[in-house]
Image (cartoon, rainbow, N blue to C red):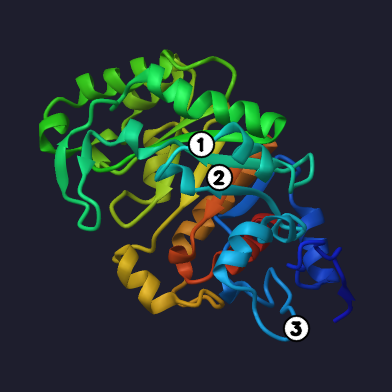
Amino acid sequence: MSQLSLFADADGVDPAPVGADMCGLAAALPARIRLGTSSWSFPGWTGLVYAAGNGKPATEQMLARRGLSAYARHPLFHTVSLDRTFYAPLTTAEFAHYAAQVPDDFRFVVKAPAAITDPVVRKAGSGEAARDNPTFLDAAAAASAFVRPAVAGVGPKAGPLVFQFPPLGRRMLADVPRLSARIAAFMTMLPRGPLYAVEVRDPDLVTSAFAAALADSGAVPCLAVHARMPSVDLQARAFDADTSAAGPLVVRWNLHAGRSYDDAKADYSPFNRIVEEDLPSRTALARLARTAAAAGRDVYVTINNKAEGSAPLSVEHLAAAITAGE
């Protein structure tokens, strides 16, 4: 196989060489479809995304600081999920630092801080609820701590701003219509302009009524491929995400069915091979992405290592399924 070398990174993390077949696969993807991964700082991706520097992989710390530029040179990667923002807000300057490392046609999927989307403040380490969260669904706090810094820093390279809600508990789910209206009202109060997406981890919220409430607020559902959630096809139907009238298609392929994050991390590490294929999800996502792009809708799909074992390989296999029409 002939090898096409990508440009070296001046800071010391070089992209892995890619073959002509990979470049051909990327060229065959519809332009509206953006595929990528959740974060990029994985030494196990050496040989897939990163070249081995001086014969050894870069460290996780080095990749976190310097790997994004090399990542963005991979021909299949036109987006990435900035997941660290879920744990703590970033400044405008930090967002701008990331944006400066990627080409103009690259887009970031940016997660809102849990301080906005989690109804409780959690204990460090255990994750147990400590007290009610005073900034839960606080639109002013979300705008000042997240939306404005992200938009100002990333600029035109901003893709969806994703508000991921954890499992919200029996008290809130006791009145799903009220909860849906509350989330939609919050989205309405955010600054206009960005593409907002809402990801839930409660199957009770996977309804056409919730999707309609989000549409009225100017937001779109983010399909969550996750062990807690219904299948991709069921979510797409419930959210009306497979219709030509829907807005952009936003998907985060997070976790293989029947797995916890900790178990998947232990069994899949170092994330350099497919361990457990998820063909139903891959096939459904390929169909959805192909149909959405054909209807003129933008498509964003980011994939976690815990989906099948290696996010870069999952991206490659999904791209192949999209272009093959499977």
Instruction: Name above or below for residue 324 compared with residue 60.
Output: above
Q: How far apart are the two marked residues, 1 and 2, measured between alpha carbons?
A: 6 Å
Instruction: Name above or below for residue 80 compared with residue 131.
Output: below
Q: Along the polypeptide, which appears first: circle 3 or circle 1? A: 3
The dot on residue 185 is none
Residue 325 lies, in percent from the top left, at: 66, 55
Question: Residue 207 lies in what quarter of the image?
Answer: top left
| Residue 292 appearing in the image | no
Say whether marks 1 and 2 touch (CB < 8 Å). yes
Residue 218 lies, in percent from the top left, at: 49, 18
Give the secondary structure at mark 2. helix
Say whether marks 3 and 1 touch (CB < 8 Å). no
Q: Amino acid at mark 1?
A: Asp
Q: Residue 137 or 95: which is nearer the viewer?
A: 95
- Quarter the C terminus occupies: bottom right
Q: Residue at x 51, y 26 (%)?
A: 147
In this figure, which residue is indicated by the disc labeled 3? 54
| Residue 258 appearing in the image | yes
Among all residues in the image, which is located at the extreme bottom? 55
Residue 66 lies, in percent from the top left, at: 68, 59
Q: How far apart are the two marked residues, 3 and 1, measured between alpha carbons?
A: 47 Å
Is label 3 or label 1 in front? 3
Give the secondary structure at mark 1. loop
In this figure, which residue is indicated by the disc labeled 1? 242
Question: Residue 235 lies in what quarter of the image?
Answer: top left
Q: Residue at x 59, y 59 (%)?
A: 64
Please state if 179 lies on the left or on the right of 318 as rendered. Answer: left
Q: Along the polypeptide, which appears first: circle 3 or circle 2? A: 3
Instruction: Name above or below for residue 80 compared with residue 136.
Output: below
In this figure, which residue is indicated by the disc labeled 2? 288
- Quarter the N terminus occupies: bottom right
Q: Amino acid at mark 2?
A: Leu
